[in-house]
Image (cartoon, rainbow, N blue to C red):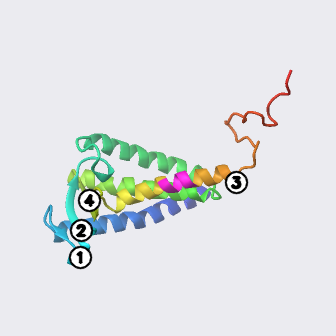
């Protein structure tokens, strides 16, 4: 029953993110020609604008000729998260949140790759690479994961060894000197 609940949580939250991602991409594709830019105010355009852009590579336009590789990676990421998420304790909410965000981002861009052969990007801020909601979800997921790991490490009392981790030098787990 717990595994079913966890899967519903994963699919529910990530489904909302995928819906926003796909909805915004649809709006951009249906209202702007490829390469066309829109901004609500002319003074804002140098800083933030919507542009219809296609991306065959990774997030933020990296490695543009590796579409097949990123399709395979996205499938593997989605399968790994589906397997791993129910095994993460509820108390480890940063890891669970990170997995939801990364799953949603991978799935959102995977849908584009499978349906269109390319990913629709549209958020353009300053001179930064054009991206989309799925890219942002993946990036925020990685940041949450790193921050969660850092906080967990800081909370752990000194000298406490987690399973599979070697004891720190000078900890009480070291044998007494000779």
Q: Circle 3 — which element?
A: helix
Please report contact status of discs 3 and 1: CB closer than 8 Å, yes or no.
no
Mark 4 vs 1, N-terminal side? 1
- Specify few, some or many for label 3: CA neighbours under 10 Å numbering under 14, 14-19, or 20 or more: few
119 or 167, nearer to the observer: 167
Between the C-alphas of marks 3 and 1, the distance is 46 Å
Q: Which residue position holds label 2? A: 46
Mark carried by residue 155: 3
Between the C-alphas of marks 3 and 4, the distance is 39 Å
- Specify few, some or many for label 2: CA neighbours under 10 Å numbering under 14, 14-19, or 20 or more: few
Who's the residue at 86% across and 20% down the image?
A: 178
Tell me: 141 left or right of 128. Answer: right
Tell me: 154 left or right of 141. Answer: right
Give the x, y percent position of residue 15: 41, 64
Q: What span is colored magenta in the figure? A: 143-147
Q: Which residue position holds label 1? A: 43
Figure label count:
4
């Amino acid at each position: 029953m717990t595994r079913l609940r966890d899967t519903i949580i994963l699919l529910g939250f990530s489904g909302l993110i995928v819906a926003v991602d796909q909805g915004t991409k649809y709006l951009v594709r249906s209202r702007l020609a490829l390469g066309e830019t829109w901004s609500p105010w002319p003074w804002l355009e140098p800083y933030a604008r919507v542009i219809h852009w296609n991306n065959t590579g990774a997030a933020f336009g990296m490695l543009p000729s590796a579409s097949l590789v990123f399709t395979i990676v996205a499938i593997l990421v989605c399968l790994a998260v589906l397997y791993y998420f129910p095994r993460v304790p509820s108390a480890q909410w940063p890891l669970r949140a990170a997995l939801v965000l990364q799953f949603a981002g991978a799935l959102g861009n995977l849908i584009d790759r499978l349906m269109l052969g390319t990913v629709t990007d549209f958020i353009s801020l300053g001179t930064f690479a054009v991206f989309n909601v799925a890219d942002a979800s993946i990036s925020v997921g990685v940041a949450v994961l790193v921050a969660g790991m850092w906080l967990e490490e800081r909370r752990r009392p000194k000298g406490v060894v987690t399973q599979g981790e070697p004891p720190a030098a000078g900890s009480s787990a070291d044998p007494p000197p000779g």
